[in-house]
Amino acid sequence: MPTLSADLLWMFVSFILTLMVFSYLFGDNALFRFVPALFIGATTGYMFVIVVFQVVLPRLVAPILNGSVITLIPIILSGLLLMKVSPKLSKFGNISMAYLVGTGAAVAIGGAILGTLFGQIKGTLTAFDSLQHATGTTPLFLILEGTFMLVGTIATLVYFNFGAKNTAQKTAKRGWLSSAFAWIGQFFIAITLGAVFAGVLTTAITALVERSDFILQSINTLLR
Amino acid sequence: MAENICPICERPNDPSAERCWYCQAELASGEQPTPVNGTDWLNGLREESEQVTDVETPAETGELEKPEEIPDWLARIRTREQLEREAQANTESAQTEPVVAGKKEELPDWLKEIKAGFSGKKSESEQDDSAPESFSPLATSTAADQKPLAVGQDQNEDTDEWLSRLAAWKPTDAESQTVDEGQDAVDFDTSEPEIPLTPMETPPKPQFDMDSLAALNQAEFRPFESKRGNGWQKLNTDELDADQQDEPQPEKQLSFDDLSPAEEELAPANFDINALRETIAVQHTDPDFFAEKVTPDASDASDEDDLLEDDFQDLNLAGVENTAVASHEESIFLEIKSEPQPGDLTSSPFVPDDLPDWLATAKLEKHEKRSNEPISDELDAGKLEATLDKGNLPAWLQAARIPTPDADGLYDSRKGETSESGLLAGISGTLQTPSFGMDIRKPVGYGSALKVSERQKQSANLFANLVDETFDDNDISLPKKSKNRRMIWRLGLAFALLLAVFLSSNILAPFIIQPALFPPEVVSVYDQVDALSLDKPVLLTSDFEAAVAGELSWSSQALLEHLMNRNMNLVIISSNPSGSTLMTQLINNAAKNVQGFDVSTHVINLGYLPGGATGVKLLAENPRAAMPYTHNLDAAWNSPILYTVYSLSDFGAVVVLSDKSESSRAWVEQIRPALGATPLMFVISAQVAPLLQPYYQSGQVSGYVAGFYGSLAYEQMLQQTSKSLSHLGAFQSAMLLVVVLILVSGVVALIRPARTERKG
Amino acid sequence: MKSPLSMLVAVLSGLLVLAGYFFPFPALIAIRTPMLDWAVTLAGIAGLVAIINLMVGVHLKRLREPGSKRFFSIVVIISFLMVAVFGFYLGPADQKFQRVVTAIQTPIETSLMALLAITLTYSSLKMLQRQRNWMGFVFFLSVILFLVINSGILAFSAEIPVLQDLLSGFHQIPAAGARGILLGIALGSLAAGVRILIGSDKPYSG
């Protein structure tokens, strides 16, 4: 029998919690419902402590104690945001929310343009550019690969374009070129989403293997 | 001998009768028009109520009802060509004709304007002098053009009068009232023609509240958008016939009679806001149209209140409930066809004079309530639903209610069929359960900017149902047998997977296939780490949840050990609250396998960086401002590890551990421009890999290790045998088992006919 | 205009931050860094608001309601208070306090993810029953192929160059699709962001 230590105790807690979650295989039950309640309480409690210690104290309290007057602005904005808790005072928090949303939108725009749009368009064209540095690969293959990437990217984008013209029959229809690209785009999207789904399943199976390993280890340790 | 069929209740009457013996509706004298496609004209009207679609054309209705009594102007509007030709001819002869003829002449003008407004084309007059946009209730009351039987022969004289009165209506201030959003969305098409009107006390200058309009959800314009190309404004009968075949029928119509009783009995009704919106959208009505005004009758308000009270008593409903009844009347018409129901009369274009008061007012009550709705986006679908007392609904109404009208148009092709399974089993004229599975969701409010095809909608709903089904075993609609079957399947699957995992370590161990192919992205990471300068610290950012801690601990183990073997200084930042702890745990675990690496001197934890992409941007711009303290609240940048770091490019490398493609994208977008030559690498969950691959190919990401198999490849390159390899057998066994199961089920599904096919 | 001050704040703050991306003037950067810092702080405080709302607005209210939900709300509140008190006493960097994550949060979340493997497999069995069309078939084949690739059992293809090239080609297909999807997401973000910056969308005025 192993000596009772903190590690062992916590391992036992983890083991029991794992089994409670797996009890869902037998249908929804009280044990399974208990676990999310515990999880929510513990996680929010942990987050509460982290936010106080790593946001409020270092970003609001410490600077103001150091005499930084400009910190009054985030303090006021934070105060206004906290008013969101009360339904009566909630509207005062809109200013802080507006500030958050405004800066967030700007960050999203800047990132989308400089990070993804420019980067990915450049990346699509780089496939052709690599012809100059090609070693060991035939130029024809590189051209085909680059064209494949280009067509796939454009076709996928075209598929997501839902704009259409009204025809004489009052039904919105794509043009023939757009339809053709959209059809090709569907193919690429199906493959991509299939790959993503396979990735999710792989992640989940990895978690299952990890938990199975943990269960075996725990049983071995507890029985030893 | 031909019977005179009542247009309201469809029952046969004596040919000589002027009024229906059953419902007292006025009958069309003379011979009835030949039913189209073997049904009478009302069939089409009833069918319209079964779906939220287009609105019937006034020309068609008028023609079918009472051909011999149709005035010239209405006859002329049957065809567009005729209208245009005769409008021109009448303009010339108008000066010599009597007053009535002159009034007739006005109608085609505004009709043309309405037509132009809805069809997106300008009428001739507008093209000439592009009149200022004006507000007209008529522009939206599509079926107001219909000429009901009850109006009789005074219609020509009435035309001018009602036009004037209509011009005098204005919307009243909306009062706060919560309305079922979903209901609202469903009702749009039907409610638009049924515009309750309020007499204006002020001159009928176009008035509307811009703030209210600004608050309107754009999606609410969709019904109107869908109407723009549809029926009622089309004056060409040929076109109409074609549309009737091709397009779904409208749900309900508003007739002149709907308006007339409203004026006479319930004067202070408000404008339907839907009509207002459409009016604003159309905005092509001639301003001269409002030249005449009607003084409102002040006594009408009190009359209406009394009527409403009576109505509630008659209906045995509270006020709110009455609204619910009214709002569900479209559903009523879906089901009850064979006999006339009160709701039929209220929504019919031919409301007889002796219509029961409670019905007439109940209908108008609905309009009033709707017009009093707060014009905001805060319509809470759940609130109103919660306030409804279903127990108080009449039995026939409860029986007639169906979940949701099918907005996708599927209904049209399936009407008349009887559902054999699902919620609507046994109810004739309802949707059959789609072959792809039961869809009992509310209609999804797709944005007005998107034109989503039926197939895309079905796919979206299918996916949502699939996800729901995954965890939604508590659904009370599931029979116990089905629940048990699912549970058995799940248990069987779990047992098989766990068995494969447990057995793999012993029995299947000889059959595992070790990685021999090294993905280029993993090789790139290895090369970058191998080439790191020792004097620069490596920034490790934790952007993953505890759910994938197991996978990422395996994936990152080899990389972390590689960094520690090189004696690199490590700096930890977390973009989620628990990430810092998880990262510390990973480093501690890795450090156990690396001799001589002291965590306390080589690792510094800067803690939690909130703000998502904004936080990452701040970090990229000024790391010292972003993370001023360690997680212990010590001054971070005085430490020996960090005192030489002023920007991100001063780090030797940035390694992000992530389990989400969105946050991975945010990291690439925000910090890549600030990194310069510093490599950006990822250790990711397998689910992120497909969406990170393009960033690697474009050179924005220097490399990544994805999932369990990626870490194995890294280990092979490091020539280490770690714990991960011992899990490879279990991993491969479980993966292969899943592949086989899916493959077999797919083959079976292809061989076996679909359930619907089996049922014939 | 519902709240002009809020809109002004959103538009001005957004434009100032956005300008910094394209015009790296020192003055602009000097303004932008504290602005981003405030936004980061506010994001943290927003998390605090969410926690308070969850505890006070949801679970404390549920205590007055009878039924099983009340019991689970009690569990939530008690566990929250215990962890919070424990955390304030020990501090977030304490190893014992970090057990909350490693011994409670991690096993629960990982176990739920493991359950997902079973339920996803179960759902996948019906994949072709539900979508009997060519799109569904392509998706099905893609899932099978990438599951096999992810499992690593095609490692033997290293000795067969043709198979290796074929696998490399298969990897290009999702990369092309993913690039299109990423560009679409970026365009969508751009449009949504611009709508906020011109005051057309006001998601903060709730």
Image (cartoon, coloured by chain):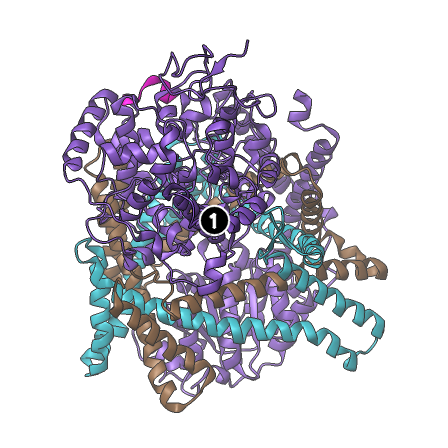
Location of residue B541 with respect to B79 vertically, above or below: below
Answer left or right for B609 relative to A166.
left
Magenta range is B392-398
Q: Which amino acid does label 1 sit on?
A: Ser
Which residue occupies 82% across, 69% down? A141
Picture coordinates of residue A109 (x, y %)? 46, 71
Can residue B258 be spotted in the picture? yes
Chain ID, cyan in image: A
Q: Name the residue under label 1.
A: B93
Image coordinates of residue B328 in percent, x first then y, are 36, 30
Query: Which chain can be seen in purple?
Result: B
Q: Which residue is drawn at 65% across and 34% down?
A: C129
Is residue B396 part of the magenta span, yes or no? Answer: yes
Q: Answer above or below: position of B464 versus C100.
A: above
Residue B472, position as x, y percentages in the image: 46, 35
Location of the C terminus of chain B by quadrant is: top right
The residue lying at 59 percent from left, 60 percent from top is C181
Residue B487: give x, y in percent of width and height.
52, 28
Q: Quadrant of residue B459?
A: top right
